[in-house]
Image (cartoon, rainbow, N blue to C red):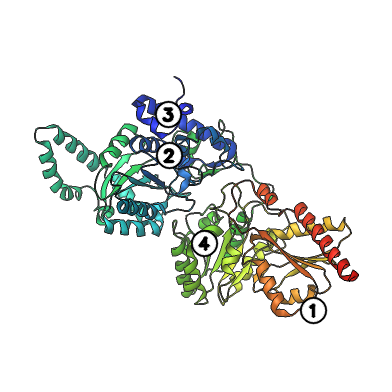
Amino acid sequence: MEPILPRLTGPEALADLNRYELQQLCAELREEIITTVSRNGGHLGASLGVVELTVALHTVFRSPDDKILWDVGHQAYGHKLLTGRYTRFRTLRRRDGLSGFPKPSESEHDMFGVGHASTAISAALGYAKARDSLGESDQAVIAVVGDGALTGGLAYEGMNNAGQCQTDLIVILNDNKMSISPNVGAIAKYLTRITAGKHYNRLEADIWSLLGKIPHGSKAQVLAGRIKESLKHLFVPASLFEELGFEYFGPINGHDLPTVIRTLRSVRNLKGPVLVHMITEKGKGYKFAEEDEQKYHGVGKFDKAEGIKVVPPSVPSYTSVFGETLVELATHDKRIHAITAAMPDGTGLNAFRSAFPERFYDVGIAEQHAVTFAAGLASGGMRPVVAIYSTFLQRAYDQLIHDVALQKLPVVFALDRAGLVGEDGPTHHGAFDLSYLRPIPGVYVMAPKDEDELRHMLASSLAHQDGPCFIRYPRGSGLGVSLSGPPRPLPLGDAEVLMRGEDVCLLAIGTMVATAQEVARQLERHGLSATVVNMRFLKPLPEKTLAEVWPGHRLIVTLEENSIVGGLGGAVLEWSATSRQNSDAEIMTLGLPDQFIEHATRSELLASIDLQSEEICERLLVEFERIARRKRAQSAS
């Protein structure tokens, strides 16, 4: 049979396909997703699991007039393929190619940008109320919630408000029992209990269908509805969703395409908020992903015929070094507890979970709760370590200030994926943590130059008793340095002078330290000598070291893999303005530009913003020439 997917110009074409063609289309979508992700990397399992649901949504609803909002945007690869992006799909996550997440600037069918979880219900309710205000009563609004998004509190805030508003809204719960790791918590157990009531649900559906076929069946259906609640309590627990004001349908096999289509058509014109509970299998249709849902959640390039072959890295990652060091320290200190928000593997805490299960907590996609929960642990005398990606800790900013810092609680925060993370793009870049942490009083903010220093910073943070400590470190492999003995505390707030020169002073933090050393070597070939300082700490700023190295240099340069607004550069400028240093040195601040940075490989991104050693060296040479011209002009006058 001739392929269908290449011929589709948009989702409206699905209305002309018969059930067999729709099934074929599902198979083609899976093949295209697997092929592209195997070449580019990406989020595989989630999109494979919602193929039938995606086809059904675009068969029943008319995007973009009807509004389909995807929660946890890595479910949306099939949606991209059905909405006019087939010819560009193989550029997914590549520089200047398609984003790995829904992006309104990319397509009119992407209603809401999303890379963080649990936002769809709130945003969909906003769309629905805007529709009501405009009088567009025939427009459907659908939120597709899945991949652990229902473990986040924001989802329930949206549901609570939707139940109060009672406007027309459809929520599809894609229940695959997984986020990146298996879903946790009371809600996950509750959904399992609902699923266990499938015999009741099948009985209810069969009776409803039968009553509809007999004379005056609609009246019989109304009568049956009156005893529905009493009957339900014999088989399944009372529905949380109905208590929140939603009409509940399900659970439904999300891979049974005809049933999914019939269900969506049935709820299309219902009044008030509706929740449709779909049971799907993450990774459906690709045996490797079905067998290991966690490994195939987010993947790099792989051979699709052979699956992912795990090759031990020659150099350990920062993440694994953090996890191993925490286990080592926790062996000697029973007060150490570890907390993560649905990412035990991604944050390196799997080893801690295995070693100390009674001291490990996966709270689900609930960063705000994670921080305040840690504050409670610290108040009770424990030493909690909260491991969360830099970009996701932004979601708990009030808790950082109000619940932790204001009370001077000794909570340690490990901020993985700081700086540019590559192909996941602007929703995942850890571009702002130095900036959003620096204004908080009484905190310590640090970034290691390599994986060995990370170990000592973790020991330093756990030894500190008076307030929170933050350690930010990048994604990926370390530098391959030797580990210098057991983890030991470093002097808090002290920097490290690595090289000494006379012309330029390079003040670098975190990943930029190695870059600064390479810049110094390149400048030496041009007859310029550089001092290189590993700042280590953004807060408190190592003022003693700054006062020592500042004099005598023609140029002071700060280097950071953080937004240029409010980070290390800003701190040094403020210090220089208030410290009254007697120096004619000019100051240059280098970092991430004041803009959202798109997706590409990390090296491509650094090159595009002139933050690799070669580009930095060229910029400094140009600056030295400008300084020299200015001084010649001053001498001539």
Under circle 1, the secondary element is: loop
Task: Determine contact: label 4, label 1, CB under 8 Å.
Answer: no
The amino acid beneath tag 3 is: Leu
Whole-angstrom CA distance, mark 2 to mark 1, is 64 Å
- Give x and y (percent) for residue 41: 57, 41
Q: Residues within 10 Å of mark 2 (few under 14, many from 20)?
A: many
Residue, disc 4: 393
The C terminus - image quarter: bottom right
Whole-angstrom CA distance, mark 3 to mark 1, is 72 Å
Counting residues from the start of the chain, the first of labels 4 and 1 encountered is 4
The residue drawn where x is 39% and y is 30% is: 13
Residue, disc 3: 25
- Give x and y (percent) for residue 346: 54, 52
Task: Determine contact: label 2, label 1, CB under 8 Å.
Answer: no
Under circle 3, the secondary element is: helix
- Give x and y (percent) for residue 385: 54, 65
Residue, disc 1: 582
Counting residues from the start of the chain, the first of labels 3 and 4 encountered is 3
The N terminus - image quarter: top left
The amino acid beneath tag 4 is: Leu
Counting residues from the start of the chain, the first of labels 3 and 1 encountered is 3
Residue 433 as seen in the image, left or right of residue 45: right
Residue, disc 2: 49
The amino acid beneath tag 2 is: Gly
Counting residues from the start of the chain, the first of labels 2 and 1 encountered is 2
